[in-house]
């Protein structure tokens, strides 16, 4: 593995460079929140429209798999794009690709075209998060980075919720969803296009090194693999299954818009607890909670809508929390010079699982029905929970003082591959 250091002007590592204006930093956050509204709407619209048109649910599953494949390509190709044109232009190029994807969806329910369109979307949205997060990490001093990034994640999650809820008020038989998605994507370009936020130097180049990441933190890598699969099947297949079970367009919108609330409710207390004890115990608890919620999803499948809303809220919140906890756990065990390669490898693991697991669920759903994703979710969460507990026994308990600071994250917002001005912390406990 080769890492090429990025040179900055001489600065105080605890203070960062000259503080960027708040309005300039907010421009990136606002842009991503606007994109999230359109993205949430399209996530909800596609399976419902296919169901209304009478297409087999397998098509919707293939579209989810195509999206994940595009995201995997985005992890690999975004770095060269940013090195070629810079952060601001890359952001606008990727936003244009999302608008193009939404336009293709608006052409009508053509599943093959939609698979290609969502693969393009997956590539673009993964690239946008890499660009936005690395840009913010470069601009922010250490003293406020955690708080600003928390606002970034919460703003995006809130935007998704608004987009999900918008499904309830549109005519599903028209291109309204696509037009709204295009409009919000176009609006998102304006704040970045007008920002005065300084662009970072060309990003560092680092190879994906899963073996090294596993050596640093097996639990962290396993967590990313687990949540990559869980996040994609919950967000991707829940609307497919709900539509197949006969729930209305408004019901699906309510179910999806409630799910991000679970992330906001559960992440803060779980993160607070993980800062005060061994994060592995909290990770195991989050995985166990995901198992319980998914079992309840089977028990009450097809039942009262509000009961399912609460169950899916808890299930999605517990699963999403694994993402932030795994990221923090791995960072606790990495040296500063390992953070870049670690972030790249963790993102690749998350994307790889997000591609493979939906493909498996799609294939199994053709035989066992649309509820298959719930059973696959039980298996993933159970295996991860048992693995974490085994690592605790095998590696011993890490003192609470060895942990760093937790920041809320979402598996819908991938890890940055470039971490500028990371804290000067030495490796404390490795291989757990």
Image (tube, rainbow, N blue to C red):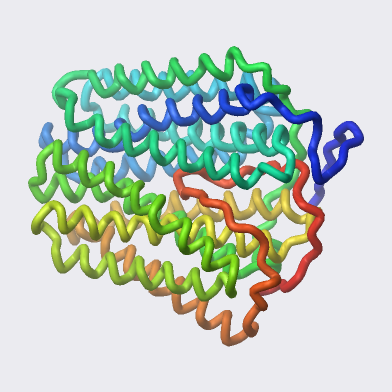
**Residue 287 to residue 234: above or below:** below
**Residue 40 to residue 174: above or below:** below
Determine if residue 152 is in view.
yes
The one of 120 and 383 positioned closer to us in this rendering: 383
Q: Position of residue 8 (x, y in %)?
A: 86, 34
- For image coordinates 54% across by 44% down, the residue present is 150
Q: Residue furthest right?
A: 10
- For image coordinates 32% across by 68% down, the residue present is 378
**Residue 172 to residue 418: above or below:** above
**Horizontal arrangement in the rendering, residue 89 relative to residue 340 (left or right):** left
Question: Which of the 4 image quarters holds residue 417?
Answer: top right
The one of 260 and 412 positioned closer to us in this rendering: 260
**Residue 24 to residue 251: above or below:** above
- For image coordinates 47% across by 63% down, the residue present is 270
Q: Position of residue 46 (x, y in %)?
A: 25, 34
Q: How many marks?
A: 0
Quadrant where the C terminus is found in the figure: bottom right
Determine if residue 359 is in view.
no
Q: Position of residue 339 (x, y in %)?
A: 73, 53
The one of 184 and 264 positioned closer to us in this rendering: 264
Question: Which of the 4 image quarters holds residue 372?
Answer: bottom left
Q: Position of residue 349 (x, y in %)?
A: 55, 55
**Horizontal arrangement in the rendering, residue 308 relative to residue 19 (left or right):** left
The one of 407 and 94 positioned closer to us in this rendering: 407
**Horizontal arrangement in the rendering, residue 212 relative to residue 271 (left or right):** right
- For image coordinates 53% across by 83% down, the residue present is 390
């Amino acid at each position: 593995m080769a890492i090429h250091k990025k040179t900055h002007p001489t600065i105080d590592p605890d203070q960062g460079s000259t503080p960027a204006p708040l309005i300039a930093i907010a421009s990136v956050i606002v842009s991503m929140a606007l994109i999230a509204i359109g993205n949430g709407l399209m996530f909800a619209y596609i399976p419902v429209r296919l169901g209304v048109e009478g297409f087999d649910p397998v098509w919707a599953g293939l579209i989810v798999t195509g999206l994940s494949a595009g995201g995997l390509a985005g992890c690999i190709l975004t770095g060269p794009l940013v090195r070629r044109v810079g952060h601001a232009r890359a952001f606008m190029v990727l936003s244009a690709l999302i608008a193009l994807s939404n336009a293709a969806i608006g052409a009508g329910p053509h599943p093959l075209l939609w698979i290609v369109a969502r693969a393009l979307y997956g590539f673009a949205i993964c690239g946008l998060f890499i660009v936005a997060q690395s840009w913010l990490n470069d601009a922010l001093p250490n003293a406020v980075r955690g708080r600003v990034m928390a606002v970034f994640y919460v703003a995006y999650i809130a935007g998704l919720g608004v987009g999900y809820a918008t499904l309830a008020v549109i005519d599903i038989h028209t291109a309204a969803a696509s037009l709204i998605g295009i409009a919000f994507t176009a609006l998102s370009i304006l704040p970045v296009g007008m920002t005065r936020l300084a662009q970072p130097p060309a990003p560092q180049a680092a190879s994906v090194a899963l073996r090294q990441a596993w050596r640093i933190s097996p639990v962290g890598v396993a967590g990313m693999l687990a949540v990559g699969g869980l996040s994609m099947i919950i967000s991707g297949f829940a609307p497919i299954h709900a539509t197949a079970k006969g729930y209305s367009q408004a019901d699906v919108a309510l179910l999806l818009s409630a799910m991000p609330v679970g992330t906001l409710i559960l992440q803060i207390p779980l993160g607070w607890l993980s800062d005060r004890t061994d994060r592995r115990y909290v990770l195991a608890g989050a995985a166990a909670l995901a198992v319980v919620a998914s079992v309840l999803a089977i028990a009450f499948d097809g039942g009262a809508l509000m009961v399912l809303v609460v169950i899916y809220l808890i299930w999605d919140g517990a699963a999403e929390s694994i993402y932030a906890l795994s990221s923090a756990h791995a960072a606790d065990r990495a040296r500063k010079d390992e953070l870049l390669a670690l972030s790249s490898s963790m993102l690749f693991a998350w994307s790889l699982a997000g591609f493979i697991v939906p493909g498996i669920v799609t294939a199994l759903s053709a035989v066992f029905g649309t509820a298959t994703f719930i059973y696959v979710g039980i298996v993933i969460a159970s295996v991860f929970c048992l693995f974490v507990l085994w690592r605790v026994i095998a590696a011993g308990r890490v003192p609470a003082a060895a942990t760093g600071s937790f920041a809320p994250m979402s598996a819908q917002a991938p890890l940055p591959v470039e971490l500028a001005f990371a804290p000067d912390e030495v490796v404390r406990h490795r291989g757990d």
